Every structure is written in C-alpha cells, then in structure tokens.
Image (spheres, rainbow, N blue to C red):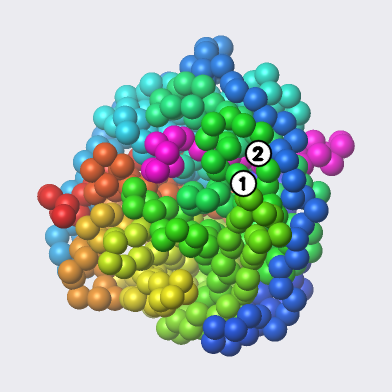
C-alpha cells in the first residue's frame, strides 16, 4: 500500500495485524494443531464477498491508454564490480538494466515477470514494459493507466488509496496478469483490480475486472494456478481473506465470480504460484504457506480447492503444521519493523520477518513436485534468509531441504526464490549493515549440489550509493521470475538508493543462468 511518506510507516506497522502488536515480543499467529491435523482455533468461514465481479470490460490497447501518460527518462549507470562469498564461482549476470525509478514515496514494492518477448515491471507508482535486452517499449506509466475508462476506484482512487500491485506471466495460457487494490475512502468502496491480457503482448488489450470487498484488501498477493487465480489479503481484525478468481472465464473476458473465505491468522500467507508449463496433478489444491507461531519452529499451510461447477464443493482446509529447523524471526525480541541498519543514518528498515516472502514458487517435474519459499531470520548477529525447498507427499508439503543463508554477520532480507526446469534454485535479496548501504545480491545452487546449501558465491547485482533516511518501509517484496522461453534463465528485480533520501529510489532488473545448458 502506498501512503504519504510520514504516514506510510505508521499504517504499515498496524496493517500486519492487531494480534501482533497486542502480543509480547512481536509474537506470530495463534498456535496451530500438531502433525497433519487442523489448527486448534476456528477454521475458515465462507466470506460474503463471494460472488460476481462488480464490473468487467475489455480495454483499448495499453499502448494507446499510455500515449499521454508521463514518461520517465532512463539513464545509463555503469555496472559495479561483483563481490564474492560462498563455494562455487560468482554468478555471471546476463543483462542488467535500470527499471522504474523515483516514484516519490515509499515503499516502491518492485516486482516483475517475464513473457515470451517482454519483461513487465510494476511498482506502487508505475508500470513499464521492456524488451529482454533492456530497451523501454512502453512507459513508465502510472499504474492506473491500465484502468483508464474503467470507472470506480480502479480508475479514480487517489494515490494514497491505491497500491500493492503485482504482475505475473501465466505460463499455461501465455498471458499477463496484473492486479492492485483500490479504495474510495469516502464511500468505503474497496476493490482488487485485475487485468488479464488478451494476447502475449503486454502493450495490447486487457480484460479488466473489479472484485469487491467489505474491508480494505491491503497487501494482496495473488498466485497463478490452473483452476483459479488465488489471492490472499488482510481483512478486519486478526483475519486474512483468501479468494479464488475464475481464471477460465477471465482468460476469455467473460463475467467471472470470486469465491472467498475469512481465515483466522494475524499475517498473510502466500499461495503456490506455478512456474513452467507442466501443471500440477488434476484437481490439486492451491497451497497457502505462512510462518508458524513464535517458538514453534514450524510453517503453517492451508489447502484451497475451488470448484466452479458447484461452489458448495469449494473447500479451504487448515491450518496444518509443518515442522522445520529451529529459527527466530529477524528482530523478534525487539521490533522487526525497525531492524535493518544502514550506513550513514540511524534509520533502520523493516525486516518483514513476520511474513513469508513472495513468491511461493511451484514446479512439477513429472516424477516429483517442488516449492520454494523464504523468510528473514536472526543469524550470526545479523539477519539471514531462511529458505526451503518443499516436496509434496500425498498432496501435503514435506521439507526436502532447508537452510539459513548468512555467510557473515551482515543483514540479508526481502528475499525471493525460484526454481528452473533443471531444479536449480536462485535466491535474490537486499543486503545492508551499519557499514554498508542497501544493495542487491543473489546466490544459488544447482540441482545436484550437496543438499541444504547455496553453493554459488554471493554476487552483487547492484551496490546502492545511498541509504533511506526518512522511512522504515524499504518494501513489501522483491521478485525472482523464470524466462518461459528456455525455462532456465532467472530474472531478479529489486530496489536500491542512488543517494541518501526518501522516495528517491531506483529499481534494477538483471538476468542470469546458473548453468550454460539446462536439462
């Protein structure tokens, strides 16, 4: 969510849930049941937000909507030297270029996805389409440009009541999907605005939808799955709302329903998000993942299955408990929202250690299924990235490998991980310390490497020249995506500061392979 600079950090802390601030030492959600059983507290209840989209239409081509929108020029910045840490050699970057910059507020929440010919990046403020060589094809345009002529909050909401956008490439349908929330504070009208491209061209036409909600759907995270697009967002009190959008109808621009549940939990889980063109087994539910209660050394998960022929057969079961190696969420004993130090300022940054980090990336290899996810934990006197590869056994997650990436005592957080068709895993994140300014780094491992280790030496994608001095909100997520053309190349998107200040951030996009030829 984008708010004015001073107000944003206050609201963001409150938005992680009243149950967090009311509990000692920033405790996590109420305890879940043990083993494969459900939680001891009440389960999900069907939400009255279920029902048809309040409005939908087909847009003119985005390139026409954006003709009169502002365009931000992009300069050329020299590439800094790469740093090393770890076992294998450093990662060789492919293309690396400047993305959207200087939206004027915090946090930027940069994320991007890769299609057959284009890369689309979106922030809390702007949207841009690039070629895979880094040339600007369209924009940057304000995020609302996509909803010109649509009406309602999706088109008219003020900048303070619009945000948390995400973009995904639907690899099965070969379409772009873009979403963000919008709210009219005067009428308490709350929407999630969704656009599905008609073709592979991100600059072309979109089928546009507005889904309605009783409460502000802050911090929404959506995931691509064969039977639906799944979305999770905050709701009133210690609840989140989980919704399924009718993907099949949205892909052809037809009227579409959503099916929603209210779920007791203090922070927002994220849904399993498909990579590659091999879908999960027919009828497989979407998995929602979250952190377990404080001190429980577990993850929580839910199983959401949408039935569009008979809504009564739609189910959301959980939470269930998945034991993992012991961990302590970053700065849990003090304040995770004022956690990460930066050089040259007393301002500390939000670790977001109370939530799993985007994405919960899923891949079906045919003979097995894998999912990767991460979150920030205390490590070596600083903060590290706890990452997991999960497998599925009878449809339920099991830990295949796990570890905390923390080769030294610096702070690493805001991670995003993904797995390519060879089973290689790449992990990107932000890095900072009292002696260094926030920078963008990546590491990775090959499928056959010794388990539980990131084996590539830490590689700096970009070194920030400044620190963020006026806000704790560094961002809500970064993104690691897979190029669908070879299903091998990774693309990472994150932010940095070119100079000290607030709202003067830049974003960077970089591609890389971990091996020369993918199997």
In the image, the segment drawn in magenta is 170-193
- Whether the magenta-drawn stretch holds residue 186 is answered as yes
Residue 116 vs 87, above or below: the answer is above
Task: Judge from the rendering whether residue 66 lies leftward or rightward of residue 466; answer left or right.
Answer: right
Which residue of the protein is positioned furthest toward the right in this rendering?
Answer: 187
- Whether the magenta-drawn stretch holds residue 365 is answered as no
Which residue of the protein is positioned furthest toward the bottom in this rendering?
Answer: 34
**Near-viewer residue (180 or 47):** 47
**Near-viewer residue (350 or 306):** 306
Quick check: marks 2 and 1 in contact, CB under 8 Å?
A: yes
Q: Secondary structure at mark 1?
A: strand
Q: Main secondary structure of the magenta part?
A: strand
Q: Residue at x 65, y 45 (%)?
A: 1
Q: Residue at x 42, y 49 (%)?
A: 479
**Near-viewer residue (440 or 263):** 263
Q: Quadrant of residue 347?
A: bottom right
Q: Position of residue 392 (x, y in %)?
A: 40, 72
The label shown at residue 116 is: none
Task: Judge from the rendering whether residue 240 lies leftward or rightward of residue 389; answer left or right.
Answer: right
Indicate which disc, 2 or 1, sits on the residue closer to the N terminus: 1
Task: Judge from the rendering whether residue 213 lies leftward or rightward of residue 325; answer left or right.
Answer: right
Q: Is residue 203 visible?
A: yes
**Mark 1 highlights which residue?**
245
Q: Secondary structure at mark 2?
A: loop
The label shown at residue 256 is: 2
Q: Residue at x 30, y 42 (%)?
A: 483
Determine the CA span between mark 2 and mark 1.
Answer: 7 Å
Task: Judge from the rendering whether residue 7 lies leftward or rightward of residue 391; answer left or right.
Answer: right
Q: Quadrant of residue 412?
A: bottom left
Q: Residue at x 37, y 72 (%)?
A: 391
């Amino acid at each position: 969510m984008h708010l004015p600079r001073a107000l944003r950090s206050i609201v963001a802390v409150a938005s992680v849930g009243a149950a967090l601030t009311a509990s000692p030492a920033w405790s996590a959600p109420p305890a879940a049941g043990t083993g494969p059983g459900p939680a001891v507290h009440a389960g999900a209840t069907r939400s009255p937000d279920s029902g048809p989209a309040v409005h939908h239409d087909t847009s003119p081509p985005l390139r026409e909507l954006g003709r009169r929108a502002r365009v931000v020029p992009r300069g050329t910045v020299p590439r800094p030297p790469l740093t090393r840490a770890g076992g294998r050699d450093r990662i060789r970057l492919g293309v690396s270029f400047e993305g959207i910059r200087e939206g004027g507020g915090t946090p930027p929440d940069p994320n991007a996805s890769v299609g057959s010919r284009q890369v689309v990046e979106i922030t809390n403020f702007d949207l841009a389409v690039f070629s895979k060589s880094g040339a600007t094809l369209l924009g940057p345009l304000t995020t609302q440009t996509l909803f010109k002529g649509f009406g309602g909050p999706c088109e008219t909401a003020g900048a303070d009541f619009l945000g948390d956008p995400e973009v995904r490439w639907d690899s099965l349908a070969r379409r772009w999907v873009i979403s963000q929330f919008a709210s009219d504070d005067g009428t308490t009208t709350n929407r999630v605005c969704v656009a599905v491209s008609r073709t592979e061209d991100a600059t072309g036409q979109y089928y546009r939808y507005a889904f309605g909600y009783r409460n502000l759907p802050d911090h929404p995270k959506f995931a691509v799955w064969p039977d639906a697009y799944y979305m999770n967002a905050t709701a009133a009190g210690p609840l989140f709302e989980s919704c399924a959008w009718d993907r099949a109808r949205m892909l052809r621009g037809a009227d579409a329903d959503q099916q929603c549940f209210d779920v007791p939990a203090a922070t927002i889980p994220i849904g399993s998000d498909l990579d590659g063109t091999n879908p999960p087994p027919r009828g497989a539910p979407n998995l929602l993942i979250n952190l377990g209660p404080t001190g429980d050394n577990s993850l929580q998960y839910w199983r959401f299955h949408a039935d569009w022929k008979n809504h009564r057969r739609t189910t959301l079961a959980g939470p269930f408990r998945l034991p993992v190696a012991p961990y302590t969420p970053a700065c849990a004993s003090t304040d995770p929202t004022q956690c990460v130090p930066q050089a040259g300022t007393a301002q500390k940054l939000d670790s977001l250690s109370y939530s799993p980090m985007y994405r919960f990336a899923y891949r079906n290899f045919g003979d097995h299924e894998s999912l990767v996810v991460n979150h920030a934990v205390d490590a070596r006197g600083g903060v590290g990235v706890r990452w997991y590869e999960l497998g599925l056994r009878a449809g339920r997650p099991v830990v295949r490998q796990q570890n905390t990436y923390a080769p030294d005592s610096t702070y690493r957080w805001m991670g995003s991980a993904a797995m390519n068709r060879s089973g290689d895993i790449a992990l990107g994140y932000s890095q900072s310390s009292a002696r260094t300014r926030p920078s963008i780094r990546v590491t990775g491992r090959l499928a056959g490497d010794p388990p539980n280790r990131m084996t590539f030496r830490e590689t700096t994608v970009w070194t920030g020249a400044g620190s963020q001095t006026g806000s704790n909100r560094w961002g809500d997520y970064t993104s690691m995506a897979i190029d669908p053309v070879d299903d091998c190349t990774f693309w990472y998107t994150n932010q940095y500061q070119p100079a000290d200040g607030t709202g003067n951030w830049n974003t960077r996009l970089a591609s890389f392979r971990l091996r020369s030829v993918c199997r």
